[in-house]
Amino acid sequence: IGLAHVKLGQTSHAVEYYNKVTARMEQLVKEEPENPVHAFALAYSYTELGDVFETIGQTEESRGLYQKAIKIGEQLTATYSNEPKYAVNLATDYYNYGLLLQTSESLDVAFKFYEKSIAIEEQLVNRYPAISDYAVNLEVSYRTIAAELYLSGVQTRTLEFYNKHAKLAAKIAELFPNIPSLDYIQMNRFYSVGMVYILNGDYKKASIHIDA
């Protein structure tokens, strides 16, 4: 319901809806503080409400809600380390908070949270190598952050992340040849290899990969 209000541009109704949901989740957490389901739902509510505030430009409100969601996510991930859904959600919260900080402050500040997000995704890939979703999530993160670094002129780290992306995309093709997104991932792999050549000054090889 809250998302429907956002799509219709009815942000005040969305805020009202998510405030009610959040208040209810907070009450459930008080009543059953050891129940991870309620805590997880509360963190999700904080994130959703934070998204709405970010949409309407209320950065401070959004920041505070993202921080609350992250705090809960960190506690759940530490307590229930064998439940990967908590780690997945925390990685997403770190990344979204990074996006907010990049817009409101700087890439340097945001990058600390991008790195935290990536660290979790790398751990999931190492721990669950047979699950394609974790590898694909990491592939998207490497590619997106490489592009952000490139646009910001941070060459050394740009090269690092394009290299990581190219290697992971190749590994995905080897391990998961039948996933629906493989063609798109491999197209981006060629682009990343091309960017590696560009950053190393080999423009002839770069044109072969980027134009492929």
Image (cartoon, rainbow, N blue to C red):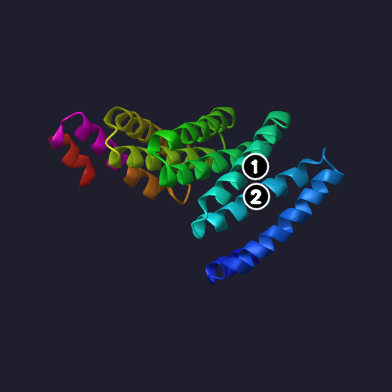
Mark 2, residue position = 46
Q: Residue at x 50, y 35 (%)?
A: 113
Residue 12, quarter of picture: bottom right
Question: Where is residue 166 shown, x and y percent of the image?
Answer: 35, 35
Residue 46, given in percent of the width and then of the height, sits at: 65, 50
Does the rendering let one see residue 182? yes
Q: Quadrant of residue 164?
A: top left
Q: Residue at x 47, y 38 (%)?
A: 138
Instruction: Write the start and end of the magenta stretch as one range.
Output: 189-203
62 horizontally vs 171: left or right:
right
Mark 1 and mark 2 in contact? Answer it, CB < 8 Å: yes
Q: Which mark is residue 16?
A: none
Residue 171 visible, this angle: no
How many angstroms separate mark 1 from mark 2 (CA)? 7 Å
Q: Earlier in the sequence, mark 1 or mark 2?
A: 2
The residue that mark 1 highlights is: 68
Answer with left or right where residue 158 lies relative to residue 130: left
